[in-house]
Amino acid sequence: MPLRTRIKICGLTQEADVDAAVEAGADAIGLVFYPRSPRYVTLQRAEALTRRLAPFMTPVGLFVNADEETVRAACDAIPHLVLQFHGDETPQACEQYGRPYLRAARMTAEFDLLHFAARYASAQALLLDAHVEGYGGGGKAFDWSLIPPSVPRPVVLSGGLTPANVIGGILQVRPWAVDVSSGVESARGIKDAVAIRRFCEAVREADARDASAGA
Ligand SMILES: O=C(O)c1ccccc1N[C@@H]1O[C@H](COP(=O)(O)O)[C@@H](O)[C@H]1O
């Protein structure tokens, strides 16, 4: 387990959401460039939102089977954008932008995560999500015991995380980072500043428990 579990808050659509993520000490924010999502943002909105980030915070652009032109436009507009591919993109499609990328895996009992990790060897991390209709953002957790003991890439635990269950997720999976969207919303696409703060506090609590267990 890393000394500090990194936190990504995904699906931000408003300035107040970004301010809440900054205040709570999140490491990254996710901007959803998937037009079918209730959290979709235009490139213009995304640029405005990223201007409010604190130093060292990472903007992550989420794509689902987007065309090359869309991804390139986002990379050009937001210089330090890390990419998150949440659809059926091949390794070659993910790599072609020369940017660090997270590859989402949709976990089921039949899914071979180790094979997937080998296929996406160029991914900076694997983001493990539940298998939901519509590719993701469904607020559904998966069975964390499906994750093999040693995944050969950093793991971002995702899917149905909330301030209430994230401590259990961190202590069981020991991921590099956690990623939340629905679990810190007051309505679909609208973040709740209090829930964002509670989520980040819960992550710190998990890290503190783990440190004291190992001391
Ligand atoms: O947020 C969306 O609408 C979305 C759409 C398509 C693919 C992924 C999407 N969201 C990502 O899914 C995971 C899990 O989200 P949740 O916490 O269960 O709501 C996360 O990375 C979201 O950003």
Image (cartoon, helix red, strand yellow):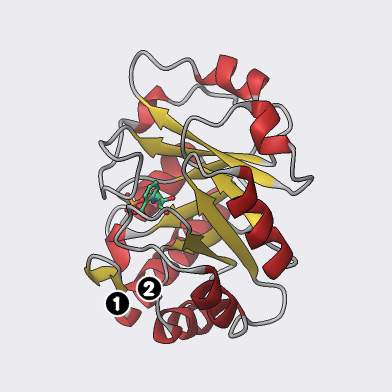
Establish whether ligand 1 lies closer than 8 Å to the Cβ of label 1: no
Q: Is residue 114 above or below residue 20?
A: above
- Asked which secondary structure carries label 1, the reply is loop
Residue at the location (63% across, 50% down)? 69
Residue at the location (54% across, 76% down)? 44
Outermost residue toward the left?
187
**Tags 2 and 1 in contact by the CB under 8 Å rule?**
yes
The amino acid marked with disc number 2 is Ile
Q: Is residue 48 above or below residue 56?
A: below
* Image position, residue 195 (x, y; %): 31, 73
* Image position, residue 114 (x, y; %): 57, 18
Q: Which residue is mark 1?
A: 192
* Image position, residue 66 (x, y; %): 52, 44
The amino acid marked with disc number 1 is Asp
Query: What is the quadrant of residue 192 in the picture?
Result: bottom left
Q: Which residue is mark 2?
A: 196
Residue at the location (50% across, 21% down)? 148
Query: What is the quadrant of residue 94 in the picture?
Result: top right
Outermost residue toward the right?
98
* Image position, residue 53 (x, y; %): 61, 80
Q: In this rendering, does residue 153 appear at all?
A: no
